[in-house]
Amino acid sequence: MEDALGANEMDMTPYFTDGFTWRGNQGSGTKKGIAEFQRNWQFPLRAAFTDRDYVTEHFMADGEWASCFGHIEGTHSGTFMGIPATGKRVKIPYMDFWRIEDGRIADNPVSVDLASVMMQLGVDVFGGHGWENFDNGTLTPPKP
C-alpha cells in the first residue's frame, strides 16, 4: 500500500477492505471507505505536495497488526491547511498502523505531524510555546 501511494496509484481496492476506516489525528479527520479516503485525504495531499518521496524508516508486524513510521518528502505546490503554495521542500513525519483482514487493511489509525509541516511552512501553531523551547533553553519548564 505504501509503495502504491508512492507510485501515485489510483486504485486502492487491492489494499483496503470495502468498509475500511482511516483514522487520523487532530487536523486529519476520519475517512470511512476508499472513496472518502481518496477524496478527503489522498487527493488533497497530492494537490498540496508534489514530487513526493515516501521514506519508511521502520516497519513492524504483530499478529493481525502491522505498522511503520517514516516520512514523506514533498514540494509544497498547492494550498495546505490554508497556506498557499510556497515551493518549499518539506518533510511530513507520520506513524501508520494497519489491522489486516483477509490480506487487506480494515482499520488504519494514522498520526501525521501536521504541526511540524506547518512550522516548516512558516506557521507556528504553538505560538512560540512549543516544548522544544524547554530543550533549547528559550523557555524554562514549569515545576509541579
Image: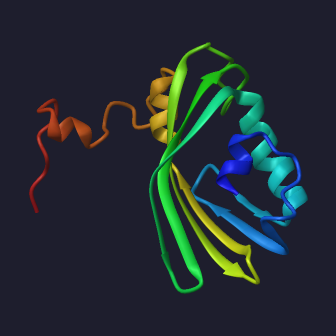
Q: Is residue 108 visible?
A: yes
x%, y% of residue 39?
86, 48
In percent of the image, x 78 and y 65: which residue is there? 15
> Quarter holding the N terminus?
bottom right
Tell me if 79 is positioned left or right of 67 in this view.
right
Q: Split into 4 quadrants, where in the image is the C terminus?
A: bottom left
| Frontmost residue, 139 versus 17 | 17
Image x and y of residue 14, in percent: 84, 65
Q: Residue at x 60, y 28 (%)?
A: 74
Instruction: Determine whether 58 is above or below 102 in the image.
Output: above
Q: Position of residue 114 (x, y in %)?
A: 53, 42
On screen, residue 96 above or below 19: above
Residue 113 is at least partly visible in this image: no
- Residue toward you, 15 or 41: 15
- Determine whether 53 is above or below 107 in the image: above
In-image side of 44 versus 51 (left or right): right
Residue occupying image coordinates x 80% and y 56% = 37
